[in-house]
Image (cartoon, rainbow, N blue to C red):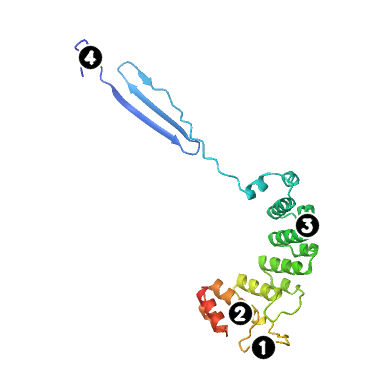
Amino acid sequence: MKNFSGGFAPIFIIYAVIVVMVVGGGYLAVKTKVLTPSKVETVQEKNVVPPVPEKKDITFSDQVTKNSISTCDSKNNLDEKNRCYEEIAIKNADVNICSKIATPSTFDHCVVGVAGVAKNVALCAKVKSDNTRNICYGSVATAIPNLSICNKIVEHPNPYGGVKDLCYANVARELKDVSICETISLAYDDQDVPKPANYQGGRVYCYQQVAKSLHDKTICEKIISTSERGKCVSGI
C-alpha cells in the first residue's frame, strides 16, 4: 500500500480487539488498540445505553399490591372499595383489613380467604354467617390439609352431599387417600323420595377427585352409577 509521496506507509500491526458486553446492565464497551513503530493509540470507549423496556399495563391486582390501603379508602364505589380491601387482606394474610369492609357477606368472604391463606382455623370464628363459617372450615382443612377440621362443620343432613362431605373429598384429594371417601356418611333421610339403588352420596365426588389426583382409573370402579363412573374415567 503506497502513500502520496510514493513510499510505503508504516506497517500497522493490530494487536488487540476487545469486545466486552455486560448483558445485565446493558453496557457495551469496545476497545481497539493499533500499534505503530512509535506509539500505541487507543480508540475511545463507547457506552451504549440499553433501550427502555416496554411499559406494561398495571392490573387491578398489581395496583392494590403496590399501593397502600389509602387507595381503597379513596374509592367512591362501595363494591370496588370492598373488593380492594379484601384483596389486600388476602395478599397480606391480614384479617384486620377485613374489618374495614362494611358489607357483612363480603366481610365473611374476606375472612374465609385470609383463613385459607394463613391456614388458621381460629379465624373462622370471626365469620358471622353459619353457612360461610362452614365453608371457612372446609377451606382451611383443605389448605393444611387436615381431616379433623372438617368435623367442625355443622349443617343439616344433605342426602346428596353437603359442605362436610365436600370437605372430606377435598382433603382426600390433597392427601391422595381414597380410604377417606369410605368414611363419608351414606345417611339418607329424604322421606319423600325413595333411596336410589346406586346411591353413594358424597362418596361419588370423593372417588372422582382422588382418582383424578392419582391418575388411577381403577378407583372409578368404586362408583355404582354408570354415568358418574364415566365422568370419573373421562376426567383422568
Quick check: 196 above or below 33? below
**Residue type marked 3:** Thr
Locate the N terminus and report the quarter of the image it occupies: top left
Residue at 48%, 31% in the rendered image: 49
Mark sitting earlier along the chain (1/4): 4
Q: Are marks 2 and 4 in contact (CB under 8 Å)?
A: no
Which of the two residues, 123 or 105, is positioned nearer the viewer here? 105
According to the image, label 2 marks what residue? 204
Which badge, 1 or 3, is on the more N-terminal residue? 3
Q: Residue furthest left?
A: 6
Q: Residues within 10 Å of mark 2 (few under 14, many from 20)?
A: many
Report the side of 23 relative to 15 (left or right): right
For residue 3, which numbered disc appears in the image? 4
User: In terms of secondary structure, where does tag 2 sit?
Assistant: helix
Residue drawn 32% across and 21% down? 35
Compute the Cα span from label 2 to label 1. Answer: 15 Å
Closer to the chain start, of discs 4 and 3, is 4
Of the two numbered discs 2 and 4 on the same chain, state the one appearing first in sequence.
4
**Residue 159: x, y in percent?**
69, 82
Q: Earlier in the sequence, mark 3 or mark 2?
A: 3
Q: Amino acid at mark 4?
A: Asn
Determine the CA span between mark 1 and mark 3: 41 Å
Q: Which residue is mark 3?
A: 103
Residue 204, by quadrant, is bottom right
Nearest to the eye among marks 2 and 4: give it: 2
Per the model, the C-alpha gap separating discs 4 and 3 is 91 Å
Q: Position of residue 93 (x, y in %)?
A: 71, 55
**Badge nearest the viewer, 1 or 4:** 1
Looking at numbered disc 1 in the image, what kind of residue is underneath it?
Answer: Lys
